[in-house]
Image (tube, coloured by chain):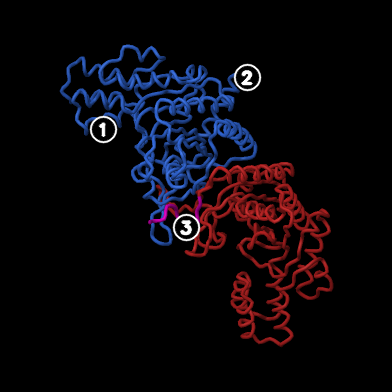
Chain colours: A blue, B red
Amino acid sequence: MAERIPSGTRDFLPDEMRELRAMTDRLRTVFEGAGYGEVYTPALEFERTFQGDLPAGPAYRLFDEHGNVLVLRADMTVPIARVAATRYASEPPPLRFSYFAHAYRRVRPQRGQSREFLQAGVELIGAPAPAGTAEVLNVLCDALDAAGLENFRVGLGDVMLYPALLRSHGIDEQSGERILALLAKGDFVGVERELAGAELSDADAELLLRVPRIRGGSEVLDGLTGPLLEAGMGMQDVLELLSPQTAARVIFDFGLVRSIGYYTGAVFQVYDPAYGTPLGSGGRYDELLGRFGRPLPAVGFALNVERLHIALTGEERGRG
Amino acid sequence: MAERIPSGTRDFLPDEMRELRAMTDRLRTVFEGAGYGEVYTPALEFERTFQGDLPAGPAYRLFDEHGNVLVLRADMTVPIARVAATRYASEPPPLRFSYFAHAYRRVRPQRGQSREFLQAGVELIGAPAPAGTAEVLNVLCDALDAAGLENFRVGLGDVMLYPALLRSHGIDEQSGERILALLAKGDFVGVERELAGAELSDADAELLLRVPRIRGGSEVLDGLTGPLLEAGMGMQDVLELLSPQTAARVIFDFGLVRSIGYYTGAVFQVYDPAYGTPLGSGGRYDELLGRFGRPLPAVGFALNVERLHIALTGEERGRG
């Protein structure tokens, strides 16, 4: 029998919808309470709005009646950057926005990827690191607390850290890009192969393999030197501005690399033992707003609402 | 300067979003209270799911990675019929569903049409006329009351009425289709021209021009004869099952014709003096479920959330 709906899409029936609504209502209460007013932008945007900044996987393209190329939004960060720069062009920063919106990505068959998924997130525009980053991390953890998730952790890294380390060891840009792509997939064997091709001392090669595996509490920030020092100090500065509850959730992760083109500094990912892959992610995108004519530093996160719901249900089941 | 977003789309900023959320929460409370559990279906469906039943204007078509043709849903009625027939195949009727979802339609330039719009609605599946029709009209009016709309009216017609009248006067099918299309656009001059080409007595031509203009209270149902009698009796049966508050809102409208291919009997439209075009519409689609393998009579409505909000704001402004 032919499939009824496209792979990577789902029907949501009333029992699940009721739980999802209750969960998003709790998230919205935290977002609004922290001053992040909800916005909604069109699902269809001009492709030129996104430029090179479409997240993983090509987007859906279609044509309007004038022959313009439209895309189904692949995330809400770029549209909100557009809104902030154009609809709030003379509003003094910082600007705070939240959203609950579906995003769309092309899927590779048989990978269990979602073609359509509901995201909940915030964007803080005009607040530089470290204070802006810390504020958004606090909102993230408060929202997850309010949703009822108990065991989550937030991985915090810096997309500048590892590229700086590669450059300082004379790895050329092309090889560096390949290494970063391998790291993004968690392919350490591939990284090792790529590093073996570079002219490195054993100690340097060992360091370049070891650093992206560094994960832990604030102790991993101690004693950093060379190109690691700056990123480590940045993370330390963020840590000092976190609420105690948020700080207790953070795991520093030197292996977090650029998953979306627009990230420029701190990046984070939300994990929960009740779900195998990240429930959400975020980071700083200090260069994106400039593209829309209002250069402002910015930071935000997006939660995958369906994954969050599964993790929540899994935790509840675990507590029996 | 180039347009920032496609014509027929909009950004919704926090003040408006807060009002829209409050309004949809009130609608959802009425829907859930009446037993209509919320469902969400994918925005992307196989084109074959919709067959000929895409509402006005062609839909957005795109291809998946297997070369299947996908469309952006143009309404939620067809997807919910699919869900009811496949996911609730052995559930005893009636089935009650509600939704809050964006729909997408291609626009003709410079017409002020929406390319994307949020719909709120219900579908009642397995409840024949007149009881099912009356239940849905009661839910519709209760929801609009809960939203705070004061001056709305619901036009109630029957898509079988005028075609039966045309047939009984020997109008051939092709000419009949043209007349119905003209009526749907409100083009009475065109209808008159088309009727002049048929071989009709003056009295018959006058009748065929007069009937689609009949609008009013239950008095318009009195003294109907011939092909009007059956549709009139159907409307009378519905009227008797309406709550007094709903009955007070209803205007019988013999000019309501088939706007979407799947309608089979009663159709309705929501009007408010504070907005120039219908805020929503609905009707019976007793043949649609059979296409998905579970023949059941059905009826539903969809409200355009943005238009409803504008009407509400207009009324409030009018009350000062």
Start-end of magenta stretch: B1-10
Of labels 2 and 1, earlier in sequence is: 1
- Looking at the image, residue A253 lies above or below residue B266: above
- Please count the marks in the image: 3
Q: Amino acid at mark 1?
A: Glu
Task: Give the structural element (helix, strand or loop) at label 1.
Answer: helix
| Residue drawn at point x = 34 percent, y = 19 percent | A232
Q: Which sits in the foreground, B182 or A268?
A: A268
The residue labelled by disc 2 is A320
Q: Are marks 2 and 1 in contact (CB under 8 Å)?
A: no
Q: Which mark is residue B13?
A: none
Does A37 appear above or below A310?
below
- Location of residue A74 in the rendering, given as x and y in whole percent from the top left corner: 43, 43
x, y (%) of residue B92?
A: 72, 44
Can you identify the residue that label 3 sits on? B7
Callouts 3 and 2 on one subunit: no
Q: Which residue in the protein does label 1 denote?
A: A177
The chain letter under disc 2 is A
Q: Amino acid at mark 2?
A: Gly
Dot 3 amino acid type: Ser
Question: Is B4 one of the magenta-colored residues?
Answer: yes
Q: Which chain does tag 1 point to?
A: A
Is residue A73 shown above or below A207?
Answer: below
